[in-house]
Each structure stands twice: as C-alpha cells, then as structure tokens.
Image: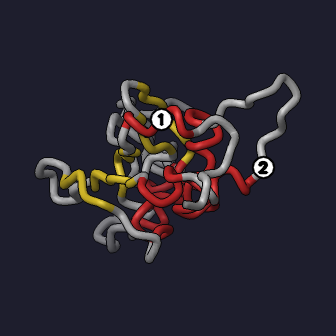
Amino acid sequence: MPDDQLGSHPLENEAPGSATPDISLLASLFGPKPEPNVIDTRTAWPVPHIMVRCGEIEFACGRQAIVGMGKVGFLEWMYQKFMWKPQRKYDVYKTFYFESSRYSKEAKVLGTFHDVHGASDMGPVVLSELGWAEMMENVVKLEVVYDENLKSEGQGQPLKQG
C-alpha cells in the first residue's frame, strides 16, 4: 500500500481529533532519536594520565598507578629510574638505597592542578603525603625537584652517618 494512503503509518489509524500520542509511544514505534554525526572532542576529566617532569625529561604515567604508589612510592620509583646507578655489574636495587639517600629526604614533588572552571591551571605547588590519592584526581602535571649537585650521591651506596 502506498505511503500516501490512510493507514500506511501506525499513527494515522487514530480517529480524527484524538490526543497526540506521547513521546514514549513515538520512541517505541520509531526507535531512539539518532545522535548527530559529530565527534565529541571534549575529554572527560580526569584523563587517564599525568605528565611527569624530572629535570629535562618529561613523560606520561598512568594516573591510577601514581595513586597506587603513594608519594613515597612514587619518589622511590623516580629514584630507582633516574638516580640510582649500580656500582658493580650485578648489583640489585634495594629499597634501603632509597631510604638512606638524601634524595628520599630532599626531593620535592610539585603539582599543577587542573582548573575545573576553565581558567589557567593552578601551580606548581609543593605536594604533601596527606591526601595524595585525592590530589592525583585533579593533577595535570607533576614535577620532581632535586638539587642536581647531589645527583652523584645515588650510586647504590647509603649515606655515611657522620
């Protein structure tokens, strides 16, 4: 039956003057309204990564990995990755090296926070251990600051107690 004849469309079978069907009936008959063919370029916050800077090196780390490490664990990971150098070929890293290093006591973590109102991001500010997980939910960038003059200290040996 052609479309221009009465009864070809489910809603045309209603008596004249009857109430217009509600939206839920229309949706059930014709399916959901199609979404526009537009790619959403907005990114949901928080994004899954945090940019990390250590000296001249900048890289991305997973947000949840940093949350799981905590501040001390994050600093130890940075120490092992960038500061510690084995003295012998088969030296194995031990947590003791980090715990007894100046780096564990003097390195600072600075954070730049995402501004949820669209203004420029806030920071960098020094971060503490308290509330680490909560702070990481709104951090855009972390920067580890340590006096470069003490860099040679991280050679796998603890500090000598004076």
For the C terminus, the image quarter is bottom right
Q: Position of residue 147 (x, y in %)?
A: 36, 41
Above/below status of 14 relative to 121: below
Residue 32 visible, this angle: yes
Is label 2 in contact with label 1 (beta carbons under 8 Å)?
Answer: no
Residue drawn at 33 percent across, 73 percent down: 19
Q: How many marks?
A: 2
For residue 151, the mark is 1
Q: Position of residue 56 (x, y in %)?
A: 37, 25
Residue 148 versus residue 158: which sits nearer the camera? 158
Residue 65 visible, this angle: no
Residue drawn at 57 percent across, 63 percent down: 70
Q: Is residue 28 left or right of residue 90?
A: left
Q: How is the image coloured?
A: secondary structure
Q: Within the image, what quadrant is residue 88 found in? A: top right
For residue 94, the mark is 2
Q: Residues within 10 Å of mark 2 (few under 14, many from 20)?
A: few
Type of residue at label 2? Answer: Lys
Residue drawn at 45 percent across, 44 percent down: 50
The CA distance from mark 2 to mark 1 is 18 Å
